[in-house]
Image (tube, grey):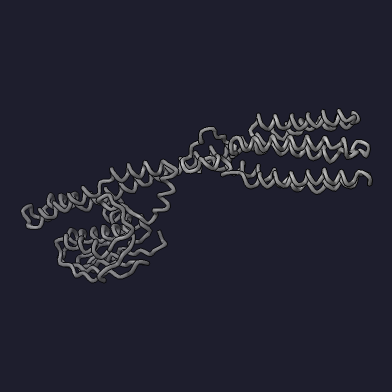
Amino acid sequence: MAQEAARLLGRFGRRYAAVVRLVTLAPIVAIALFRAAPENLPRTALAVTVAAAWTCGYAWWLARDQGDGSWPARGRGNGRRPAGGRGDGRRPGRSDGAVVLDVLVLVGLSASVWWTGALDDTNTGWLRLLVLFMCVTCQWHTPLPVGAAAALAAGCGTVLVIAAAGAESSVVRGLLWTPAAAALSRVGWALLRRAARRADLTAAEAARARGESLVAAAVRAEEREFAASLHDTAATTLLMVGIGQVRSDAGWLAAQARRDLDRLHAGRPTTRTRRDLDRLHSGDGREQARADGRKQARPDGREQADADVVALVRAGVDGVPLTVEFDAPEEVRVPYAVARAIAGAAGEALTNVRRHAGTTRATVRLRGDGRGVRLDVTDLGRGFAPEEVPATRYGLRESVRGRMARVGGTAVITSAPGEGTSVRLEWRAGDG
């Protein structure tokens, strides 16, 4: 979420201001009552009761009326600031009115020195503390103009009222420190807000970098898959014709060429890559992408949560000019990307049988369920030494092992000269 740190800090400012006002209330009440002379105690108790009731009510409002801590509650949903709204998490007008009322109540309470005998009892300390904590905490949940005006009005108003009542100069000087304390509080809060904005900027930059990294990884994965499809289809078919392994007038060649073209056309990465690029560059798109984590794009561009790996492998088996014994359950549904990777790797293994094994027969056995799949492609052909295959050979490296690795699976090739070849593909849910 954008501006998360600033939003949380705004909410914290209101809650912490409410907590401070409530926590300091008990000692303030105790000071007022303990320092009052017996004959002034009832009137002092009445003034203190009003102060306590107002403080509790104002603290309740602070803790409750906070919107989302960043924008007014009515502006949620579109990320924009409502007309007339502020960026401090307050409702316009209503919040300013509450602050003004807070100032008026406290200045009015300071006028109680006229009839409570507070000056005779030297009992003005509780009023000074009440106003001090109001001015300090007000800076944590108001914009600068409102906070400054509230501190000046409350501090200077209390000074004027108590001075007019005949207070000693030492009492007046003590009250004059209230606006200074409010100013220090505002400076500290401004530094916190600045740090929160920097944290939000850093988080936004990190999110952007992660989005770009995800896009780049998605593009690379699509390019590798398309390159593997190109290798498995048109490139392999043309190579077999070019080196004379297949006659150009072979009956199955035209149908194979059509299947190759259809597969390449369906697997083009352009549309999907652009869509993923747009989604991952937006915060909402990243959240939606996580929510749709199990969904995969099919070659026709639609989204599908899973697919029948048996049907996909069978389609590949039917398209290879080999006699294949295919042993598999009726249906095994797994995530679409996994099914496509297993079918593609199995198809490449069968193509290698056709090109290199010197046999026209192979066996494909598939076992598993939605939690895991194992597929074996075996032949009794001439075999080879896997460790002697150059690292530059694309087929086994990318079309078989690479495909399985990209979906969290494995591919194990077992072979030896004169002993045939076995390719085992395995995938387990949770390994990817």
Is 313 drawn above or below residue 254 in the view shown? below
Is 267 drawn above or below residue 175 in the view shown? below
Q: Residue at x 16, y 50 (%)?
A: 239
Left or right: 426 as drawn, with respect to 97: left
Between residue 348 and residue 296, name the one nearer to us: 296
Using the rendered image of the protein, determine whether residue 213 is visible from the camera's viewpoint: yes
On the image, the x and y values in percent for residue 219 come to: 34, 44
Left or right: 431 as drawn, with respect to 316: right
Between residue 268 and residue 418, name the one nearer to us: 268
Q: Residue at x 76, y 32 (%)?
A: 154
Considering every residue shown, the one lying at the far left of the view is 249
Residue 326: quadrant of the picture: bottom left
Q: How many marks are shown on the rendered structure?
A: 0
Q: Residue at x 48, y 39 (%)?
A: 79
Left or right: 425 as drawn, with respect to 22: left
Residue 354: quadrant of the picture: bottom left
Between residue 221 and residue 357, name the one nearer to us: 221
On the image, the x and y values in percent for residue 410 come to: 35, 61
Left or right: 151 as drawn, with respect to 385: right
On the image, the x and y values in percent for residue 80 come to: 48, 37
Using the rendered image of the protein, determine whether residue 31 is visible from the camera's viewpoint: no
Image quarter (top left, top right, bottom left or bottom right) of the C terminus: bottom left
Is 302 drawn above or below residue 188 in the view shown? below
On the image, the x and y values in percent for residue 148 come to: 70, 30
Is 65 drawn above or below residue 398 in the view shown? above
